[in-house]
Image: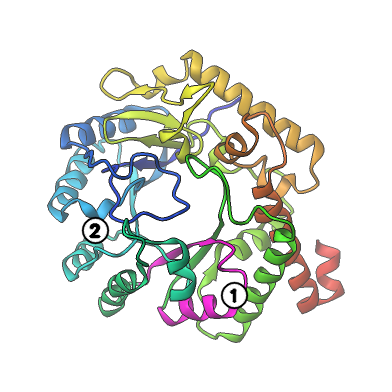
């Protein structure tokens, strides 16, 4: 398997999260483990000395609630990383947050460092609060929206990551109206999947595929009615793929070294970010090494990297040979395959039937209804 260029580095600033979403895949979100600036500096050293690093890298603070650490930490962390960027790699900063801890000072920080902010918001209160709760079981919508409003007042347009659950399916129009009204720039729909410690999904039931397909088609109709609609990731990616007629789509999740994941102790993994914290009954952990002992080049010579790469690639080859939708997903997401089938070498999962097959069918049908026979020829 060929190695990819590292375009994304996911850094876990802390394992702790101040909320307790019912579908969360992270096992240690109650533990207040925090990364040190020494570890941040060593991660930067390893990244910028590596032959894998691309000309532009997105550094994502994620895998816990990043804003539970103070702004002063990120000021110093960004400085440590930038000082070590002797090769002039273009850095794009990103934070994925539940928005409950956003303040005016955080908004100033986002603007000062040009940080792309992704907010975890599932839709209006009745949808969001069904699964995004705190440790007392209380919904977090009002606290999230307080942070969203502060971003609005600061002139910042967040990207939204919405998890689609069984609570979402009856309310596509309300969900899209919510995202439009808050001025979101971009929306990604993550269908709830079995991953990490989230062993089952509310979307694993009879009729889920047709229900999601109808849900997405109604979202697309809402997009057309709203003049200031955000971009929808699923629509943009599918249309781009159809128009390019490309057959080489591969998600970064199944390309070795394309994504590098660092936990707060400096341990490193690649492929799906969810694998960083997984403990599997047969495989153990998927940690390849740590930045204090190993260069990134060292990692690809380890036994765990070899068999992990081999098993993931075998699953990709099987998908290519057996699935008409392969060109849209490139073999799927290793963490989801492992959670649903207990192996990386598998093919179809319920997640891919929803996210890819039902999703692509919904978008293609919408395009055909809108553009008629002309679109049918292209598809």
The answer to the question of whether label 2 and label 1 lie on touching residues, with beta carbons closer than 8 A, is: no
Q: Nearer the viewer, mark 2 or mark 1?
A: 1
Report the residue marked by disc 1: 172
Give, as a single range, the part of the protein colored magenta.
Answer: 157-182
Tell me what residue is drawn at x 58 percent, y 41 percent.
Answer: 336
Q: Residues within 10 Å of mark 2 (few under 14, many from 20)?
A: some
Q: Residue furthest front?
A: 136
Q: Locate residue 113: give its quadrant.
A: bottom left
345 w.r.t. 190: above or below:
above
Does the magenta segment cover residue 343?
no
Nearer-N-terminus badge (2/1):
2
Residue 273 seen in render: yes
User: At 43% from the left edge and 68% from the top edge, which residue is drawn?
Assistant: 129
Is residue 161 or residue 341 the one in the foreground?
341
For the N terminus, the image quarter is top right
Which residue in the protein does label 2 denote? Answer: 113
């Amino acid at each position: 398997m060929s190695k990819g260029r590292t375009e994304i580095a996911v850094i876990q600033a802390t394992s702790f999260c101040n909320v307790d979403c019912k579908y969360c895949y992270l096992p240690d979100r109650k533990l207040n483990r925090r990364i040190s600036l020494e570890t941040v500096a060593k991660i930067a050293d390893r990244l910028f000395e590596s032959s894998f690093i691309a000309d532009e890298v997105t550094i994502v603070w994620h895998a816990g609630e990043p804003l539970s650490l103070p702004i002063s930490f990120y000021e110093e962390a960004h400085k440590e990383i930038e000082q070590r960027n002797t090769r002039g790699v273009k850095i794009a900063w990103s934070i994925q947050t539940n928005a409950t801890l956003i303040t005016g000072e955080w908004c100033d920080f986002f603007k000062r460092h040009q940080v792309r902010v992704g907010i975890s918001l599932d839709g209006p209160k009745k949808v969001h609060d069904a699964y995004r709760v705190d440790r007392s079981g209380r919904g977090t919508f009002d606290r999230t929206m307080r942070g969203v409003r502060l971003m609005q007042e600061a002139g910042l347009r967040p990207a939204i990551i919405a998890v689609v659950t069984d609570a979402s399916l009856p309310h596509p129009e309300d969900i899209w109206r919510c995202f439009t009204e808050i001025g979101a720039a971009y929306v990604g729909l993550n269908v709830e999947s079995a991953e990490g410690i989230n062993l089952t999904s509310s979307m694993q039931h009879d009729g889920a595929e047709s229900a999601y397909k109808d849900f997405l088609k109604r979202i697309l109709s809402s997009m057309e009615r709203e003049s200031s609609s955000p971009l929808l990731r699923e629509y943009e990616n599918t249309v781009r793929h159809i128009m390019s007629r490309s057959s080489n789509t591969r998600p970064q999740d199944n390309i070795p070294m394309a994504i590098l994941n660092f936990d707060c102790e400096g341990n490193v993994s690649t492929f799906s970010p969810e694998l960083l914290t997984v403990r599997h009954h047969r495989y153990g952990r998927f940690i390849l090494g740590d930045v204090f002992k190993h260069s990134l080049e060292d990692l690809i010579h380890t036994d765990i990297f070899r068999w992990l790469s081999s098993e993931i690639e075998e699953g990709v080859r099987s998908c290519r040979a057996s699935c008409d939708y392969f060109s849209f997903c490139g073999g799927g997401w290793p963490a989801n395959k492992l959670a649903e089938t207990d192996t990386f070498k598998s093919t179809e999962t319920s997640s891919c039937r929803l996210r890819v097959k039902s999703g692509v069918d919904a978008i293609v049908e919408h395009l055909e209804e809108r553009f008629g026979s002309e679109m049918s020829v292209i598809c």
